Structure formats: C-alpha cells, structure tokens
Amino acid sequence: MKRENSIFLAAPIAALIVNFLFLQDADYRIPFLSLILLLAFAFATGVYTEVKKCSKDTKVMLVKSGGLVLATLGMIQLMCIYRQDFFGNDRVLFKWVWILGLILSYIIFIFAYTNGEITESTVFLILMAGICIRVFYVVLMQVNLYQNDAGLFQVNSGGHLGYIYHFYSKGTLPDFNPRSYDQFYHPPLHHMIAAVWLKLNTVFGKGGEGLDEFLQSLTLFYSACTLGFLNKIGIKLNISCKGRAIAMGIISFLPFGIMMGGAVNNDGLMLLFEVIAVYCTLQWFDEPSVKHILLMALTIGCAMMTKLSGGLIAPAVAVVMFIKVWKDKRHIKNYMMQFLCFALVAFPLGLWYPIKNLIQYDIPITYIRSLSDDVAQYIGSYGAGQRFFGTGGQFYPLYVGFDNTQADVAYNIPISIVKFLTFGDGNYYLQNSAATRLGPWVFYLTMILLVLAFVAMIIWLFRREAEGHARLLILISVLVLIASYIKFCFDYPHVGTMHVRHIMLAIYFCFLGLGGFLSEGEAQSGKALVVKGFLGAALLYMVLSALLMFAMQAQFYR
C-alpha cells in the first residue's frame, strides 16, 4: 500500500474505535477493557510487522503512530480527571495546559521532523495527528453541543437530527411538505446514511436515549477521509513533501475543521464528496476513461444529493473537461460519449430530490429557508457578529443586540470567517483562563496564515507550469465558492450564511496553494529559509490549536 493511502486504513479504524471502545455518558471515557483491547491491538500490529518483515521505515512509522494514539488517550484521560476532580478550577487547568503544550511541542517535533528530513511518512504522521485530535474532540464533546441546525433526535423535531430520526424511525422519504420542518428541504443522502449507521449500532446492542451520540464516529470518518484526499490532490499538484507537510499540518489542525469531525449536519459529507470529485477529475484528465468520468459523475452527484451547493464545483470541472477535449480533438466523439455518461449519472443523482419537491410541493430548486428580522439568529445567536477588541485592548466579543443596534458589526464578513474558522460557534473561549489566553494567539495566527495562504495560492496558480489544468481547477473552484458565498451573505443577511462551513473547500485549497508555492524552488537559500519559517509556524499552530481544543473541552461535564 502506498504511504499516502495508509490514512484510508487509519480513518475507519479510528471511527470504529471511537464508536465501540469509548463511553460517551461516563465520567471516564476509556473503560479499562477498552484500554486492554487497544494495547492488544498495538501488540498484534507489532507482531504482524515482524512476521511480514516490514521495512524499518514502516516499523518506525507504526511506533510513532502508536505514540500519537497514546498521547491522545493521555489527553482524554487528563481531561476526564479535570472534569471529575477539578472542574471549574482554572488555575489547575491553566497549569495542565502549559505542561501539555510542552509535551505536545516535543511530540510533534520528534514525530513529524526526524533526522532533518520530511518524507511521505512525515506527512502521514501529520494526518494521523489530525485524526487523533478529532478523536479527542469527538470522544469528549456531546452531540448536542456546538452544532449547526441540529435539532433533536426525536419525533416531530426539525433540524438535521430530526431529519435523521425520520429516516431512522420510518425508513422513508418525508411524505409531507419538507418546509414543515427545519432542514428537511435538504437532499437526504447524509441523513439516510446516518440512519442506516444508527440501525447498525442497534444490531450491536447500542441504543437508548444517547443513540445519536454514535453519529459523531461517522462524521469523524468523513473528516479523516477528507484529509486523506486533500493530501492526494496535493500529490497530483506536484506539491513536495515539505509543502504538503506545512499545508496538511495547518489544514488538519484548523479548529473548525476539527469541529466538523463531530458535526452531525450534512456539510462534512458534502465536503468529502467535493474533495473526491476534484481528485477524480484530475485522475480523469490524466487517464480519460469511462471509469474515471463515472467516478466524477458519481461523486459530484452524491455531493449534490447531500447538499445542493455541492454542485458549485461543477463549473471548474466543466472547464477542465473542455480543456481536455481542446487538447485532444481527434477523439472528440469518444469524449462526447463520456460526457453523455457523466450527465446521465450526475444530474439525476444530484437533482432528483429538489425536482421532486418542485413538482410535488412547488418548492423552488434553490430554496433557502429565510429568517425574519426579529429572529434572534438574525444578528447575534451564532456569535459571528461580535467585536474582538474591547476597551483596554482586551480580546472579548461584544454581542450585537437583537434590536439591530450596532448591526454593522454583524456584517463584517472577513472577521466572521476567521472567527468561525478559529472558534466555531459560541463564546466558549471566554469561559476559562486557558481558552481566553489561547484564543487571541490562535485567532491572529489563523488570520495571518489564511491571508498569506491566499496570496501565495494566487501567485502559485498563475505560474505557467505543466499541470496548468490542475491549477485552473483549483483556481476556478476557489473563485466560484467565494463569489457564491459573498452573494449568499448579501442575499440572505443572516449570521448563519456568513458561517465558514460554506467555503471550507476554498479555505483548504488556499492552504494547499501555500504548500505548492513553498514547494517550488525550496532548495534555494532564500526560499529554504522561508520554508523553515512556515514549518515552524505550522508546528506552532498545531500545538496551539490542540491546546485550544483541550481548553474547550473543560467547559462541559456531566
């Protein structure tokens, strides 16, 4: 197995471990028996590598991966101890955060940067660290917290959990106007898969009041696979190991990206299908076969059947398809047949549900649930419309009143993007000293890295190189997503529309572009110094983000 594909083995294993070996409703989330099983699995893996006489590099990678897992288990246990014995004691929490920060700095440096070289194994370990921090978040965060439009997992409830419950309990599409319940107008793929996953859990004896907690292991799997395919796109773009180490280090530890690993809405699955569709498009360009174009059609269709905005990558894909035909005009008939196959798969798959609702309930295909001006969410309930600078230079939000006072603050789109990217929803970062002190560092570092990444991406994309079609695919995708996002914000001026989850693919591509920019000419003395600087910044970001996630978990205890 290629090293870059190893992450796709780690992703389902991590999801299954979270699903079956941790306890969501216990003070200590790691049962003793589960710990024994994990240690037995690690021992069996070591024996397997000896029997198969695996290479030294593989053994070292497995040992380091095991170390990351043990560090994650230690962080989970440490937080469980805090919640049980020191809950609310900020002094103890802050001391632990500093100690943990030193340990994490050492672990990440040793695990990611060995003998002065960065290889595919290094990139894999960074992706593994990204999965581990998502495991930490999912295990300790209850499913009802920091969700978007979640609702309740019960009968007659709206939201994504209510939508999932409908499929779980009835096993059929809604036989009523989807506008009757919030979020039911969305295409149903994610909600159907989630319902099937919960049914499978009941077969294995899971159930009861907290059944919906097991949804987070499913979305953890989505998020982990997304990281893997982003790395594969980076390889397709000829980004070096150092460039991808920087890009994937930042991408893997973006706080909201971590939170998406436990989000029960449909954004995570749509994002995964979008990323796979981009990768399949690059595959098709290199090898224009029916198999690859059908994979393109299937993934784009599934992205749209998860959330209609998944179709926003279609313009970029169409341009790449046109470029391929223009370069290879001799086989235009073959391409026309392939395009027909693409249309026969992608359009019915992506549009059947909106068309059904249009015919049956006269719901516009691009229907968006609108909010009235007097709804709390209109300005402040998400916390996006917040000031970050108080009197005396303090870092804290000033919530905009629901009476539309200071409403101009709520429409600061750039600040809202960084705020959501750093903190997600709410103001948990004000609830203890550790989070309050870490918050500004992560916020400003996120802002600086994002601005630099966007500029570097533009410079890199406009350079004339052999893989120009791939760069054009990335550029058009980013521009379409950003343009659609800005239009969305102005057409529906609610805080929810300003959420960064609507443009996470563009954010990820910006950081891939940064990696691409740094990978070109990295051997030059001046560029090498810049690359080392960004490596340091990426390592610092990984540590600070992990500590912020740690401090975030300190708010919740049951």
Image (cartoon, rainbow, N blue to C red):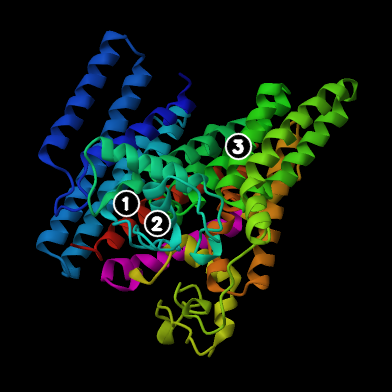
Residue at coordinates 17% horizontally, 70% vertically from top-left?
88
Q: Earlier in the sequence, mark 2 or mark 1?
A: 2
Q: Where residue 116 sits: x, y (%)?
A: 43, 32
Residue at coordinates 44% horizontally, 76% vertically from top-left?
381
**Which residue does the numbered mark 3 point to in the structure image?**
299
Report the magenta stretch's main SS. Answer: helix
Crowd band around label 1 with a 10 angstrom C-alpha radius: few (<14), some (14–19), many (20+): many
Q: Helix, strand or loop at disc 1?
A: helix
Magenta stretch: give its range.
Answer: 429-453
Q: Nearer the viewer, residue 279 or 60?
A: 279
Residue with the most extreme right position: 330
Cα separation between marks 3 and 1:
26 Å
> Does the residue at mark 3 contact the one at mark 2 (Cβ under 8 Å)?
no
Cα separation between marks 2 and 1:
8 Å
**Which residue does the numbered mark 1 point to in the structure image?**
212
Q: Where residue 363 sits: x, y (%)?
A: 65, 61
Tell me the amino acid under the disc marked 1: Asp
Q: Where residue 94 sits: x, y (%)?
A: 22, 64
Quarter of the image with the C terminus in it: bottom left
**Which residue does the numbered mark 2 point to in the structure image?**
161
Q: Is residue 394 left or right of residue 107?
A: right
On residue 342, the disc is: none
Q: Is residue 34 left or right of residue 501?
A: left
